[in-house]
Amino acid sequence: MNIILNNNNEELQGTQMSIAELLEVKKYSFKMLVIKVNGTIIKRDDYPTTFIKEGDDVLVLHLMSGG
């Protein structure tokens, strides 16, 4: 499956993948993430049940704080 991940083309195995699986496959381990799929923010509780599919635009943002 081909998706756009953080504005880059990515080829992934299979025809669909949950957000939780994507984070594991891509080794995103940072605790404070914001995930958007096709412009819609996905809640953390929905990561295992929200699936991405061919052509989706996925944005993974790392939240940082500072002063």
Image (spheres, helix red, strand yellow):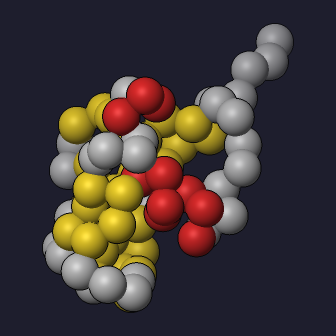
Residue at (34% x, 66% y) in the render: 17
Seen in the image, is 63 located left or right of residue 7? right
The quarter of the image holding the N terminus is: bottom left
Residue 23 in picture, x, y percent from top left? 55, 57
Q: Quadrant for residue 10, please give it.
A: bottom left
Residue at (80% x, 18% y) in the render: 66
Looking at this view, name the residue that lies furthest to the front: 49
Residue 46 in picture, x, y percent from top left? 36, 34
Seen in the image, is 60 located left or right of residue 9? right
Q: Is residue 55 above or below residue 38?
A: below
Number of residue marks: 0
The quarter of the image holding the C terminus is: top right
Q: Nearer the viewer, residue 5 or 24?
A: 24
Q: Quadrant for residue 31, please give it.
A: top right
Residue at (72% x, 50% y) in the render: 29
Q: Is residue 44 above or below residue 3?
A: above
Residue 7 visible (yes or no): no
Residue at (26% x, 71% y) in the render: 16
Q: Is residue 13 above or below residue 27?
A: below
Residue 56 in picture, x, y percent from top left? 21, 64
Looking at this view, name the residue that lies furthest to the right: 67
Q: Quadrant for residue 35, please give it.
A: top left
Q: Is residue 41 above or below residue 27?
A: above
Seen in the image, is 57 located left or right of residue 67? left
Residue 45 visible (yes or no): yes
Looking at this view, name the residue that lies furthest to the top: 67
